[in-house]
Image (spheres, rainbow, N blue to C red):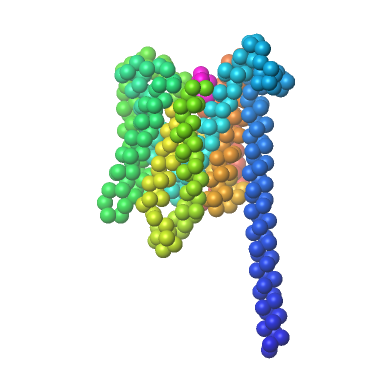
Amino acid sequence: MRQAEQIEATSSAEDTGRSAAGLTRRRAALAGGLVLGVGVLVLMAMASVALGARSMPLSAVLDAFLAPDGSSDHTVIRELRVPRTLLGIGVGTSLGLAGALMQSLTRNPLADPGLLGINEGAALGVTLALAVFGLSDPAVYVWFAFAGAAAASVVVYSLGSAGRSGAGPVRLALAGIAVGMVFTAACSAILRMDPQTFDRMRFWLAGSLAGQTADTMVRLAPFMIAGLVLGLLLGRPLNMLSLGDDAGKSLGVAVTRTRVLTAVAVTLLCGAATAAAGPLWFVGLAVPHAVRALVGHDQRWVLPYSALVAPVLLLGADVVGRLVARPGEVQVGIMCAVIGAPIFILMARRRRLAAL
């Protein structure tokens, strides 16, 4: 009997050791995937700087930083393409992380940052800046877009949290859809009454990284960084909330505080990104699905992977849009849908999309 117990104990210890070793290998593989993703992002950023209406060799790109001579090529690289690439990285990271946070918060796999009306609030803010205040400088009206996004988030959470049941996922989603419709109607009414504002808004509404300066990125970077840090810190409590509110409370999660912080992070990320590049709808929806298919449902990995994969997609779409319509370009908002939609449809047909 004692020998049998020893054999059983030894077998149990071996199983535990194998399980721990397997978990360690998985974590190492996921960490290695993040490093690989950083490398892919660097390569995509280099392609974004080198390719465009006029393609330039990488040697010219390096010379523009190491030995600038004031030539037209170096000026284009330093003043146009580098700020555009950095903006694409910031916008992509913000939208990817915001989408993953939204889908986790609402436990809705079809959720994206627009579900809380944030995109519509930012669009209304820009419309008011152009039509009412006559502001045409992107570095100025981005603040109106951010204010509109923040206002939309506050209104949606106030409506969704009214009553005894609190701010549940379904209530937040319904409130967001309703508020977004109201903001969209107001924006459409203003644009119809002011054709000049509509002409200036058309390019922004299509979603584009063009036309923004380094000053825009500098002004928006603090909001993006704050939203990024806050969002990445929410992985553990969101994991617990995925089990349900009651289970989350029993595990020590402050449910209301977690939802508020997640909404703040989404507002910072999506508001700043929308202000800079316009409403880009597809990135925040599709990227978290692809990431969950790769790494599983652990938000501690889903969130950083989403923040890394999204700018790769956005920069790739921007580069393709510049190459297919030389010397003009196709806006990145259009290219994201053209490139990403077939991939998303293929994912949906080949395997059931991950539920939350």
Q: In this view, does 331 lie to the left or right of 24?
A: left
Question: Which is the main secondary structure of the residues drawn in magenta?
Answer: loop
Compared with residue 260, is residue 123 higher up or lower down, i.e. above or below? above
Residue at left offset 58%, top offset 15%: 328
Residue 183 image offset from top left, x and y in percent: 33, 31
- The quadrant of the picture occupied by the N terminus is bottom right
View extreme (top): residue: 71
Q: Which of 343 and 114 is in front in this view?
A: 114
View extreme (bottom): residue: 1
- Image quadrant in which you'd find residue 25: bottom right
Residue 191 image offset from top left, x and y in percent: 35, 20
In this picture, which residue range is highlighted in magenta?
208-213
- Image quadrant in which you'd find residue 245: bottom left
Q: In this view, does 327 lie to the left or right of 249?
A: right
Magenta segment includes 134: no
Q: Can residue 225 be seen in this view?
A: yes
Compared with residue 264, is residue 198 higher up or lower down, i.e. above or below? above
Compared with residue 113, is residue 207 higher up or lower down, i.e. above or below? above
Residue at left offset 56%, top offset 23%: 83
- Image quadrant in which you'd find residue 329: top right
Q: Nearer the viewer, residue 205 or 105?
A: 105
Residue 152 image offset from top left, x and y in percent: 35, 36
Total number of numbered discs in the rendering: 0
Q: Can residue 338 be seen in this view?
A: no
View extreme (front): residue: 67
Q: Nearer the viewer, residue 217 or 169?
A: 217
Residue at left offset 58%, top offset 52%: 296
